[in-house]
Image (spheres, rainbow, N blue to C red):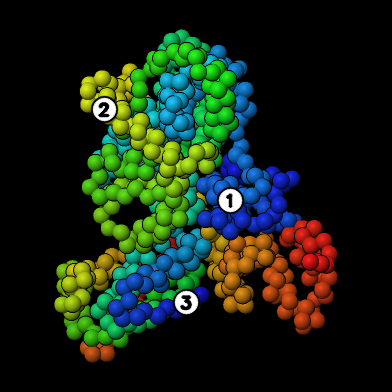
Amino acid sequence: MHQEYTVIEGDFVNAGKASSSVKKTLKQLNVNPQVVKRVVVALYEAEVNAIAHAYGGKVLVDIDPDKIKMVVADKGPGIPDIAWAMEEGHSTARPEVRDMGFGAGMGLPNMQKNVDKLNVTSEVGVGTTVEMEVNFS
Amino acid sequence: MFYHALQIEDERCIGCSRCMKVCPTEAIRINGGKATIQEHRCIDCGKCYEVCPAQSISIKDDDFEMFRRYPHSVALLPAVFIGQFPDEISVSKVYATLRELGFAHVMEVESAAAIYRDVKEKYAREHPDIRPLISSFCPAIVRLIQIKYPSLTENIMPIKVPLDLCAMYALEELLSRGIPREEIGLFYITPCAAKVSAVKAPVGEEKSLIDGVINMNLLYNRVYKHIKDMGKNHQYPPLSRQRLSADAILSTLTNGERRICSAKRSYAIDGIENVMDFLDKLENDEVEGVEFLELRACDQSCAGALLSCDNRFLCGERMYARARKAAERERNGEMPRDREMDKFKDYLVAHSLVDEVEPRSMMVLDPDISKALEKMEKIERMKGHLPQIDCGVCGAPTCEAFATDVVCGQAHLEQCVFYRLHLEAKGKMTLNEGRSNMYAVWGDDRISGEIDV
């Protein structure tokens, strides 16, 4: 099953729309509540990233009987050093975004904690793509 | 089989579908011109009861006279019961009237509020890994979380509510006087449907100690009538039992638990829609650092309970007034705080835990995930063809609920009036077939003939 959502830059009001919708779907599929929680936390984090740090993007979700794949692809400044950004406390957030309480450098580590597979690719000046997978059992 | 205490009487139901539209868990459908409740979705919040114009929805209670079979009948009152009466009818008058009506003993369940608070605090200390902790107080909320927010069931404190603690106390007290169990009848005066379910089908327990449930409206009428019948000069005996503390009186109102809990950050939320909004956020981990949640299904908590016959704000203010008086007595040292149950406190605390609350999601489309996925894809496709105006003419509250019903074999597509018109226009369905479909949902007596005005 495939679902798509659009994320708009700076639209914090609607942050979490994709993760809420995915949550409802997974509940209907009888996925273990604790697994649902991990999916939702990771996807919410990625959604907020695309809203806060990039110029918006797309969320693509594919649900199979055994796992969920999520791709959050943004157009944005990109991340120069991914390995550095994966560490807690490291952030490439712009100052105005930090002023809003984002950019604590917990985003990617938090995603990593909650998913079974995480792959981040990025090109500076073009954008970042976060691919995540969570197994249902 | 899931127990629920709200029931629709077919003979009275006019099939108006008001209940279907307000049900927060989409538990109601119209069939054959009558509303029906899907038991696995009903949480006994009573929204349907409030809007029914035909008084066709009732709460399963026990025969009022049942308590007379027990020489030691105990009326377990919620404090909101006292809050129903105007100022000139004092607390001691209500207590005395209940005795004159035949109850051997009268107790307010909030007598156990202090112990309830202590047990919750102890649980919070012993489970620092579970946050936020959600109060077990409102049974409609416990059921809401079970069916709609299954990932949060582990956050509900598995602790007996004041009603059960009070019942336990009353029983121990009477047994300790050498009275045999069969002579003791514990009767709860219920302000709502959810508490009936909590007694008849408790969550986390095999069986409740309560022997019967009495509808608060019914008892209100009896008490009021008795007081009127006795006239102004009737001498009521003074209150013998210790009075409730201010904290106890306020405990059933919104903020009643929150204001006396030690959690650093906590919220008190009343009204089921507000609670659902908040739980949606909480489930997404969008709310951080919350330690305790007091969640109540009714607006203004128990003052706005279904069977609260007076306005929720009037009832609430009377309770505040009573609490202010109690607080003054406490300040003047006229009343020891929260001592009533000290005699059996250790016993009550030791027996205060229930089993963990189990999730029982209503949302699951199929236990087999592959089949559930198939169904979901069908629902998505079907939704694209439905009008999305949630008119309810199909007998389901929303187009989405209808699509789900169709895919799960509980409805058929021809129930949709838009789709039917489409089929008729294409010559794929006759007008008579279309009308039969309409009758199947709404009954055949909706339109009697041409309307001539």
Residue at 40% x, 49% y: name it: B270
Mark closer to the chain start, 2 or 1? 1
Residue kind at label 2, given as amino acid type:
Glu
Residue at 34% x, 65% y: name it: A41
**Looking at the image, how many numbered discs can be counted on the residues?**
3
Q: Which mark is residue B328?
A: 2
Residue at 47% x, 31% y: name it: B85
Share a chain, discs 3 and 1?
A: no
Estimate the spatial distance between the alpha carbons at disc 2 and disc 1, rounded to whole Å: 40 Å
| Residue found at the very far top of the displayed protein | B178
- Asked if residue B323 is positioned above or below residue B145 in the image, the reply reads above
Residue kind at label 3, given as amino acid type:
Gln
Q: Position of residue B322 (x, y in %)?
A: 35, 30
Q: Is residue B179 left or right of residue B320?
A: right
- Asked if residue A59 is positioned above or below residue B407 in the image, the reply reads below
Residue B356 visible in the picture? no
Share a chain, discs 2 and 1?
A: yes
Q: Position of residue B156 (x, y in %)?
A: 38, 45
The answer to which of B225 and A76 lies nearer the viewer is: B225
Q: Which mark is residue B51?
A: 1
Q: Which mark is residue A3?
A: 3
The quadrant in which the C terminus of chain A is found is bottom left
Task: Report crowding for label 3: few under 14, some 14 to 19, many 20 or more residues within 10 A (C-alpha).
Answer: few
- SS at circle 3: strand
Q: Is residue B407 left or right of residue B237?
A: right
Q: Nearer the viewer, mark 2 or mark 1?
A: 2
Q: Chain of mark 2?
A: B
Task: Report crowding for label 2: few under 14, some 14 to 19, many 20 or more residues within 10 A (C-alpha).
Answer: some
Q: Position of residue B136 (x, y in %)?
A: 40, 41
- SS at circle 2: helix
